[in-house]
Amino acid sequence: MPGGRSSHKTTGKLARQLLFSEALLQAKGTPPQTATQPSTTYEEMANPTQEPSMDRILQEISAVDHRLVGMDNAMVSMAAEMKSICTEIASFQTHVLGLEQRVSKVEAHASSFQNRDQELLFLRSKLTDLEDRIRRDYVRFIGFLENIKGEDLHRFLRDTLPRLTDTVFEPPLEFQRAHRLGPRRTGTDAHPRPIIACLLRHTQVRQLIQKARTQVPCQLDGHIIRISADFSKETSDRRRAFLALRPRLHQMEVKYGLFDPARMWITKNGISKDFYDPEDLRAFLDGLSLTDSSTLPPHRDMMATDQNTPLKDLAPGGSGSDHQSVITCPRGRDLERLLHSHDDRGQVLHVVALHTQVADRDKSCSPSKPLAETT
């Protein structure tokens, strides 16, 4: 057929071109294609009508079989690896499940421990209160010499305390027991041990402590005697922490009172408040100081150097104004003139002297250290 002839001609032409290309490659030193390669040879392409030989077919089948065997081996190896990974994942899942169960148990125990902590704090407070109630009839004496011991200590306290506090006790003082605390101290400069005594009547305990507080200091033969109530260690620590805040309360002009066993009562700006924890009182004072500092009126620094400086320049707020100024006076006569002066309307200026400073006429005074304050 004409179409078949043209196809054979085209194929033969292509085969001749390939043979020519192969010859050129061999001339350049490129190794020719081996017979074992599975690709179709040029001779077969030149003769498309020729059927491949049986050996060629077997070689191709063998090559395909080898490739399939390699793929099977690879698949077996991958399957083994996947199985190992699945086993590890299952182990991890089991481990994670066990950890979750343990965490749940720990959380449950933690919540119960938290409740127990609250119960322990409550029981501790109850124990402290019970100990303070047991000690409410005890009185602590500090300063008595060591020459009194045993039963003589009862007689000594019964005879000495009325004279020491200038009080007549009716009925006379009676002690259940009295003894010194701790081992005897040695040395010439050793302080006498405290005496703790349990009185029979609580009313006499309060009377004795009240007299000791009003009659300060109590002295016996030139020795200062301190009389105080006996508290538990926790209560004593709280009282000591409250007393450490007294300078700050004085500085902030806060009225206060420490009541038994450890309760601090304060009053500021007509508002009273009770505190049982020193940390709560400290936090309250911090907030109070911040509030006071934020509500203070603004100050204005000025310098008065001339005796003839008008007062309206010293206090630019004028009469009837709420303006507040801070005036620094390098000379004492300027401060004296301010303290006894009137404004331009004849009204008295409210002047409060803050500090006193002596300086020479030519020496300036820093505005950061005000000497007088006008309102």
Image (tube, helix red, strand yellow):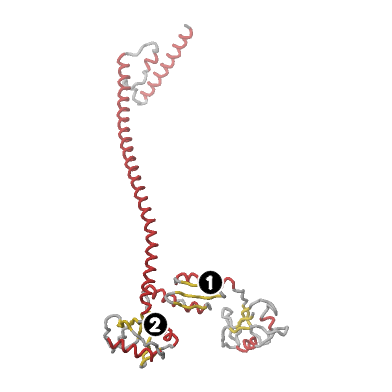
Q: Which residue is depicted at the point 44% across and 15% down?
A: 13
Residue 12 rendering spot, x and y as whole percentages: 42, 13
Counting labels gives: 2
Q: Identify which residue, 278 or 205, lies in the foreground.
A: 205
Q: Is residue 373 left or right of residue 146?
A: right
Report helix, strand or loop for mark 1: helix
Q: CA distance from mark 2 to mark 1?
A: 37 Å
Q: Nearer the viewer, residue 306 or 97?
A: 97
Q: Is residue 149 above or below residue 253?
A: below
Q: Residue at x 50, y 70 (%)?
A: 284
The spot of residue 87 in percent (x, y) is: 31, 38
Q: Amino acid at mark 1?
A: Leu
Which circle, 2 or 1, is nearer the viewer?
2
The mark that comes first in sequence, 2 or 1, is: 2
Mark 2, Cα crowd under 10 Å, few <14 / some 14-19 / many 20+, is some
Query: Which of the 4 image quadrants contains residue 237?
Result: bottom left
Residue 368, percent across and down?
57, 78
Give the amino acid type for the residue marked by disc 2 in the picture.
Val
| Image side of residue 321 versus residue 230, left or right | right
Residue at the limit of the structure toward the top, as seen here? 1
Q: Residue at x 27, y 81 (%)?
A: 183
Mark 2 in CB contact with mark 1 (< 8 angstroms): no
Left or right, 133 with respect to 364, comes to left
Quarter of the image for the C terminus: give it. bottom right
| Vertical order, 206 against 71 (above or below) | below
Residue where numbered disc 2 is placed? 205
Q: Position of residue 14 (x, y in %)?
A: 43, 17
Give the residue pinned by disc 1: 288
Q: Which mark is residue 314?
A: none
